[in-house]
Amino acid sequence: MPDMTPARTFDALIIGAGFSGLYQLLCLRDRLGLNVQVLEAGDGVGGTWYWNRYPGARCDSESHSYNYTFSKELFEEWEWSERYPEQPEILRYLNHVADRFDLRRSIRFGTRVAGARHDEATNSWSVTTEDGETLTAQFLITAVGCLSTANVPAFPGLSDFQGRWYHTGQWPHDGVDFEGKRVGLVGTGSTGIQATPVIAAAAAHLTVFQRTANYSVPAHNAPLTPEFKHWVRSNHAELRRIMQSTPNGHPFVIEDRSVWDVTADQRQAIYEAAWAKGGLQFRAAFRDLLIDKEANDTAAEFLKGKIREIVEDPATAELLADIDHPYAAKRPPIDSDYFATFNRPNVTLVDVRNAPIERITPSGIRTAKAEYPLDIIVFATGFDAMTGPLLKMHIEGRVGLTLAKAWEAGPRNCLGLQVAGFPNLFTITGPGSPSVLCNMPVAIEQHVEWITACIARLRADGLASIEPTEAAMDDWVMQVNEAARSTLLPQARHSWYLGANVPGKPRVFMPYAGGMARYRSICDEVAAKGYPGFMRCT
Ligand code: NA7
């Protein structure tokens, strides 16, 4: 009888079947011919887009840039329907990719990884699943996403709440019925801003609990015209070139002009045009918006003015426009009628900066000032970003060193890709890489291709393992800090870029802010020079 026991030994194990896991699988299995297994907690592909099914979930990158570009054929055969892709459409796209490249047969679904331990004697990683199974491989690649560990604040009383509560990143697959319900939404980041108008349209009443007011620029989402679709299909190479050469991996270039090169009237006209165009491109109106605070103030004032214009009730408008950080120093949301939603009679804004949420009661939310009766609470409270999904697993490297210990004071690694003491472990879009500051598929393709080339080279050279030196890590951490310091990003002191949204998390600016293009050339140079700063061993 043939042995039907599933294989447990592989060349490479990949954790996660989202954008990064799928492409890493394709590269290692089909290009390098390795024996690869992907372990995925969900019952389908999609990663972030498998879990984030909240009302209004949509990507802020424009659809023609929110896809892989490694395959011209794949790029040309897929057609997005709207300017920004909605969650179900992104999930359809990733399922299409999985089918087109026959990836499913190498993915084990419903398998959550509990931990991984490196064994020096065998130069292999033993990966344990929550079901108690152990699989081994020479290479371990985490493709776990940056925003995949839900952050539900530890409000006292939550377990006594008599209604239903949900975190946006763990949304029920069969949806939530808001009809006739009093809904409370906590959080006004990108997610809360997307969900607010959609929930308001369905619920009897929506109360939005705002701790930090936020900027937002209209998305101006709309169906794509046949002409635009045709233009996209005909410009694969050019779009790929632009996305790979811009700091944020988007398909537009940042204008090469300073805020101070133009008159106040010209500036106003430029901002009006950028507002009319909408989307993340607003940031690209001037080259100095993210490096010069006074330049940034001009954009901030314009955007606050728009809030006051749109929102009819002056007190609500003031609360929404009372923003405490430079524009785009936190991840800048884009929206569909967010501010106008506060003109609806069934929507209330509650300030929880000055009167914080004290507890969840059986019947609602109590702040320092009042109690709000609710049937449903939606937590749009974000994620334990970047390090959360990695540290949730127990990863143990050489001589019992855990990743949690190695990163006690904040993440330390080289190029955001590898950590000393953890041989052959690669972290796709890990902290210290451009990741969340970049259009994700662009960052992911670069990482996956670098890792693939690194492993191919290692094997070609007859070597068995690679890891960075401590000195190379120190140098990279310094470069990450310097890159952040040369922007206004650290000035948003409460941002998740700094880990400030999770109590007890070390305050370290996590993503590499030097731009994707610069990062790519640094990584290319390291590879071209034979991996200086890395120990490659037999
Ligand atoms: P974010 O951007 O982290 O936003 C979370 C929101 O939840 C933000 O407004 C927080 O206020 C608020 N929050 C968090 N904890 C609390 C407590 N305890 N009380 C009140 N309010 C709270 O997460 P998103 O899901 O919106 O976006 C994450 C990324 O996904 C986004 O940037 C895109 O890249 C995609 P705070 O600002 O901390 O005062």
Image (cartoon, rainbow, N blue to C red):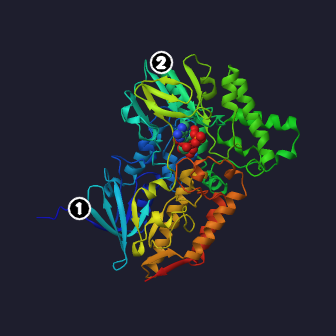
Residue 303 position within the rendered picture, expressed as x and y whole percent measured from the top left: 72, 34
Q: Residue at x 61, y 27 (%)?
A: 337
Which residue in the protein does label 1 denote? 6
Compute the Cα span from label 1 to label 2: 51 Å
Disc 1 residue crowd, few under 14, some 14–19, many 20+, Cα 10 Å: few
Apparent side of residue 520 relative to residue 408 in the rendered image (left or right): right
Specify the farthest residue to the right: 263
Q: Residue 37 is drawn in which quadrant?
A: bottom left
Which residue in the protein does label 2 denote? 204
Specify the farthest residue to the front: 368
Secondary structure found at label 1: loop
Q: Residue at x 77, y 36 (%)?
A: 301
Quadrant of ligand 1: it is top right
Amino acid carrying label 2: it is Ala
Residue 365 position within the rendered picture, expressed as x and y whole percent measured from the top left: 48, 28
Q: Residue 338 is drawn in which quadrant?
A: top right
Quadrant for the N terminus, please.
Answer: bottom left
Q: Residue at x 35, y 47 (%)?
A: 42
Apparent side of residue 3 relative to residue 285 in the rendered image (left or right): left
Q: Residue at x 49, y 80 (%)?
A: 536
Secondary structure found at label 2: loop
Residue 59 position within the rendered picture, expressed as x and y whole percent measured from the top left: 54, 41
